[in-house]
Amino acid sequence: MMLRRLASTLPSNLKGVSMQTIEKFRASEAKKAVVVVPPSELFADPVLRVEPFIEGTSESSELRVPWRVFKEPERPDVLHQYVTWQRANWRQVHRAAKTRGEVRGSGRKLRPQKGSGMARVGSARVPIRRGGSKAHGPKRRDFAQALTKQTRKLAMRCVLSQKFREGNLVVVSDLGGTGGKTKTVAAEVDRRWSPGALFVYDTPDDLFLRASRNLPKVDVSNQKSLGVHAVLKRKHLVLTKQACLLLINRLNPAAAAD
């Protein structure tokens, strides 16, 4: 009876099919439905759980963060613009070869045009002579690009919001408790943040830096030099509480307006 009631609401091309196919159709239609989020929920400040780096070493707490930083809409165009700018500025400037006007030497004619019995010759800086210039050599190329500060901040808010929506943003109290042991950090990463994570700190922990230095799946960065490319490279983003607060102060547009 239930199958007949469901089949009556289906398109004609799906009538007479199995119950499994009907459930798949209902699930696909449910995904197409537009979910209306009330403004009170859309503009509510999210609450992040602050966990210890080593579970069981201390109690967890909560941190309320502004929605302007962690609920930014998706902007793939801004992220692409930031990554392109960042990778272009990493490229080294090509060193140019010297032309005959730049190479060292005099422009005086080496010998008279006639009377020597040898071939005529002019300057000593021509490309065919030893110590001369380079013909058709490489030119100086500077790949640096410019990107406004507002766009850079927007890209950082977008990538933080993306990690928050995916559930891959974690806040820890600090990065202590490792004892400088690579085995301890590797075990925590494999158990909680596989396949890899980016750890962002404010005050460096020498023991943690030494323990994570030899792990291929772990990246460590200071919050001042944090970039979009580094965040997108790893699946999980682990922030210390102090680094998270400093990022909020720098990226929050409401704080900048005040």
Image: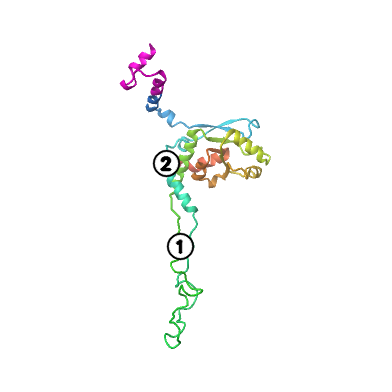
Image coords of residue 235 (percent x, y): 52, 38
| Residue found 45% across the figure and 37% down from its top | 68
Residue located farthest toward the top when viewing the structure as drawn: 1
Decide if residue 150 is in sight here: no
Q: Is residue 97 above or below residue 42?
A: below
Instruction: Report the amino acid beneath label 2.
Output: Pro
Q: Which corner quadrant of the image does residue 155 belong to?
A: top left
Q: How is the image coloured?
A: rainbow
| Residue found 44% across the figure and 86% down from its top | 112
Decide if residue 67 is in sight here: yes
Q: Which mark is residue 159?
A: none
Crowding around mark 2 (Cα neighbors within 10 Å: few <14, some 14 to 19, many 20+) is few
Q: Which residues are magenta?
A: 1-26
Q: Could you tell me if the residues under marks 2 and 1 are in contact, i.e. CB atoms within 8 Å?
A: no
Image coords of residue 53 (percent x, y): 62, 35
Chain-order first, disc 2 or disc 1:
2
Image coords of residue 215 (percent x, y): 61, 43
Residue located farthest toward the bottom when viewing the structure as drawn: 115
Judging by the rendered image, the residue that carries numbered circle 1 is: 140
Q: Which mark is residue 76?
A: 2
